[in-house]
Amino acid sequence: DSGVTQTPKHLITATGQRVTLRCSPRSGDLSVYWYQQSLDQGLQFLIQYYNGEERAKGNILERFSAQQFPDLHSELNLSSLELGDSALYFCASSPTGVGNTGELFFGEGSRLTVL
Amino acid sequence: AQKVTQAQTEISVVEKEDVTLDCVYETRDTTYYLFWYKQPPSGELVFLIRRNSFDEQNEISGRYSWNFQKSTSSFNFTITASQVVDSAVYFCALVQGGSEKLVFGKGTKLTVNP
């Protein structure tokens, strides 16, 4: 158990809909990351927050947004869903940052299926 | 730009065999960090090791060992006396110092047969 909690574990929805994925980082970790894993693209970095502020952005679509709240939990919002958004979405956390001295610990992922 | 190449898409071995998973990386930075993660069939990503670019010492942890060679830009992972529970997809990843964008390879699927 990494200590990173993600909900829901599985989600099935229809095209055009909007969903919210939630992540609680490990206790004490200030950095939260979101990754998308799909068969064709592999593991792709989406976005990172540090103590409530956006710090780094990767290949995140404009239809997607995220935020980190004062209690450090984070939410990833996916809107106008398309079939191609079906993927496993991982949240990860780090005490400082993965590019410094921090390690990166992943949750179990939220599997999104868009029908 | 950073890039991680795991040329072996799938490997199949018989239990107790040794197996090496290859990882070749590209970066222009002198400070960077390399990682290995394991993704078992259940789907979670399990952290195995992090190594910084200034530490080329090989590391051993039980049946796992890692060989970091800057001269060949490789960070290979060896499992000794493989077990069925080692069956998983293994990812190598790289991040530049000061960056937050961890770049993953495509992964190597290891199947250990009894």
Image: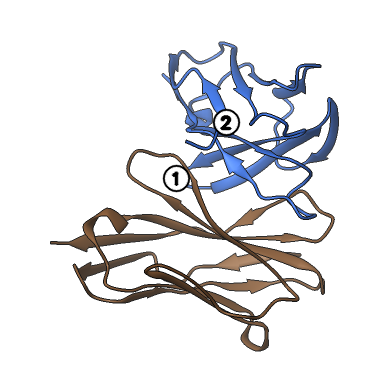
Numbered label attached to residue A39: 1
The chain displayed blue equals A
- What SS does tag 1 mark? loop
Q: Is residue B64 left or right of residue B17?
A: right
Which amino acid type is marked by label 2? Val
Residue B52 tag number: none
**Residue located at (61% from left, 45% from top):** A44
Q: Nearer the viewer, residue A16 or A56?
A: A56
Which chain is in brown here? B
Task: Report which residue position mark 2 lands on.
Answer: A4
The quarter in which the C terminus of chain B is drawn is bottom left
Callouts 1 and 2 on one subunit: yes
Where is residue A72, by image quadrant?
top right
Q: Chain of mark 1?
A: A
Outermost residue on the front side: it is: B62
- The residue mark sitting in front, 1 or 2, is 2
In the picture, measured across the screen, residue A42 lies left or right of residue B110, that is right
